[in-house]
Image (cartoon, rainbow, N blue to C red):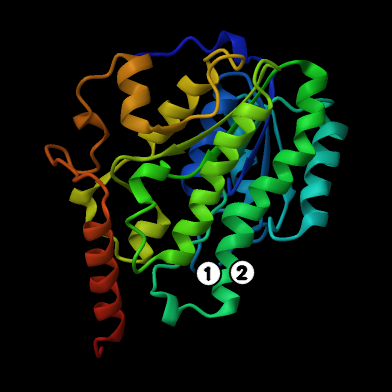
């Protein structure tokens, strides 16, 4: 899409969780390019044999592009780590304006196939961490009279009755959306906004590739979510809050985008709307491949 007017974001400070790779990294890089000082808060600090990218890689790329960022190793399941992220952000940059709760854990299985450890994982990463980190950041956003919080979660109406086969995962993700709805009401008029964001289609990422959720023709590039994030951050936080947003709708309404084909990973392809049947079919196919003899 055309270049956005991001002048209002210059010198703001953003915390982005899960920013060592994938969508989180792409968001961090774009924010830094707009003049935002970025805190890259993720678990991976050392190179991993199977997972490319570290917090230091992201920060290095930001610095090489002329941006300003710092890396903080953080396991979002650990409340002490979340507190350290906030404390270190204030030590380095003196303020907090933007929080992108991007870190996520996925588990697509039936209730019977979900043990307590898997349940705790998705709840801790997808719901509890955004809840606690948001709570820690709020006083500092209030001191500035301005703030944007974005959680990664789907609209309630879209998933509330379509959760079979992924109850634990969707419960955790819908919890992030409920934070956005509830906090939007609690903070109305304060200048601090909280919204959730979700893609219309599958997004190319380590998750979709590793778990076999479709093929490249089924994916859009992460740019579509990044563009949506940047448009959300340009909205007035006094009024634009408490919503469950879809990337396509944001780009159409506020970015004037009518044709989304440029976001397709495979030129000319038309990725399908992400729905329960598609997701479960892809999950089942990934499970079959994993069990197949080699």
Secondary structure beneath label 1:
loop
Residue that label 2 marks: 120
What distance separates the C-alpha of mark 1 from that of mark 2?
26 Å
Q: Give the residue at x 47% y 62%.
A: 169
Tell me: residue 162, above or below residue 97: below
Q: Nearer the viewer, residue 73 or 211?
A: 211
- The crowding category of the residue bearing disc 1, from other C-alpha atoms within 10 Å (few below 14, some 14 to 19, many at least 20), is few
Q: Give the residue at x 25% y 78%.
A: 289
Percent of width and height locating residue 156: 42, 44
Tell me: residue 90, above or below residue 210: above
Q: Give the residue at x 37% y 34%.
A: 246
Residue that label 1 marks: 49
Q: Nearer the viewer, residue 52 or 31?
A: 31
Q: Residue furthest left?
A: 268
Q: Nearer the viewer, residue 50 or 84?
A: 84
Q: Give the residue at x 76% y 32%.
A: 138
* Tag 1 and tag 2, C-beta contact below 8 Å: no
State the image quarter where residue 9 is shown: top right
Secondary structure beneath label 2:
helix
Callout in the foreground (1, 2):
2
State the image quarter where residue 290 is shown: bottom left
């Amino acid at each position: 899409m055309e270049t956005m007017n991001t002048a209002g974001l210059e010198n703001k400070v953003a915390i982005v969780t899960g920013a060592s790779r994938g969508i989180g990294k792409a968001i961090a890089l774009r924010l830094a390019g707009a003049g935002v000082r970025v805190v890259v808060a993720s678990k991976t600090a050392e190179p991993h044999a199977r997972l490319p990218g570290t917090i230091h890689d992201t920060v290095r790329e930001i610095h090489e592009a002329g941006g300003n960022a710092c890396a903080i190793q953080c396991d979002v399941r650990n409340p002490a780590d979340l507190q350290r992220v906030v404390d270190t952000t204030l030590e380095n940059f003196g303020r907090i304006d933007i929080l992108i709760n991007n870190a996520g854990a996925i588990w697509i299985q039936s209730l019977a196939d979900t043990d307590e450890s898997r349940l705790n994982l998705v709840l801790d990463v997808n719901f509890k961490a955004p809840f606690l980190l948001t709570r820690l950041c709020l006083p500092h956003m209030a001191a500035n009279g301005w703030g944007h919080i974005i959680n990664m979660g789907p609209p309630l109406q879209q998933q509330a009755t379509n959760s079979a086969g992924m109850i634990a995962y969707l419960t955790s993700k819908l919890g992030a959306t409920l934070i956005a709805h509830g906090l939007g009401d609690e903070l109305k008029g304060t200048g601090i906004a909280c919204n959730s964001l979700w893609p219309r289609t599958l997004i190319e990422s380590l998750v979709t590739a590793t778990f076999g959720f479709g093929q490249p023709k089924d994916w859009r590039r992460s740019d579509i979510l990044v563009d949506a994030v940047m448009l959300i951050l340009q909205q007035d936080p006094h009024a634009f809050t408490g919503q469950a947003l879809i990337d396509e709708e944001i780009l159409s309404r506020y970015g004037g985008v009518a044709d989304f084909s440029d976001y397709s990973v495979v030129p000319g392809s038309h990725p399908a709307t992400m729905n329960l049947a598609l997701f479960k079919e892809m999950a089942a196919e990934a499970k079959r491949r994993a069990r197949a003899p080699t």
